[in-house]
Amino acid sequence: MTSLKSVPALLGAALLAALALRTVPWSAGLAAPETPFTHSTTPFLAPAYALLRDAEARIPRGASVAVLAEPRDARLESHFYRLGLALLPERDVLPAAFFDRFTPEATWAPAEYLVVVGKRPESEPGRLVLETPRGSVWRRSKR
């Protein structure tokens, strides 16, 4: 008789497992996503995350850096600034935008490096350090 008492618990566990499996993005396969943002509610941050992750090895500690969007977008650049703070430790990340508003260019003009998320800038802002499908990293000449 004790085995019949565990049937509702097993059915409940099976139902919870089925509900959980229903949320798995099967079409994307079972491989890990490229970034934590790839399948999130903010997938627009995935390219910036991937580029900043790759740029971390190319930008020396102690350097100043600004993260821009191409084309320029204050909303995106506000997010990119925060990602830069998180993914580029021991660098001086300067905001090109904050709270969805552009900062004066003088705020980020001193940056030694520019990380440009998106297409390559029309005029090269310095020496190309890294280029990926997500964007580019530039070493600016001393000003």
Image: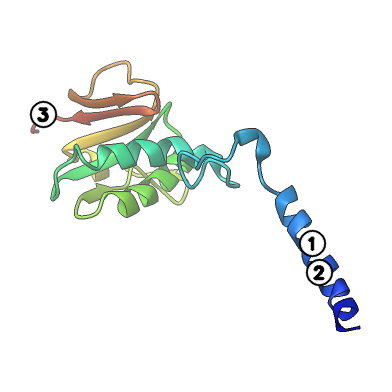
Q: Secondary structure at mark 3?
A: loop
Q: Which residue is mark 1?
A: 14
**Left or right: 60 with respect to 8?**
left
- Residue type pointed to by label 1: Ala
Rendering colour mode: rainbow
Residue drawn at the location 57% of the way across and 40% of the way down? 30
Residue found at the far bottom of this picture: 2
Rounded to the nearest angstrom, the CA distance separating label 3 from label 2 is 67 Å
The C terminus sits in image quarter: top left
Discs 1, 2 touching: Cβ within 8 Å: yes
- Residue type pointed to by label 3: Ser
Q: Which residue is mark 3?
A: 141
Query: Picture coordinates of residue 78 (x, y %)?
Result: 42, 46
Rounded to the nearest angstrom, the CA distance separating label 1 from label 2 is 6 Å
Of the pair 6 and 64, the residue shown nearer to us: 6
Query: Picture coordinates of residue 6 (x, y %)?
Result: 84, 77
Q: Secondary structure at mark 2?
A: helix
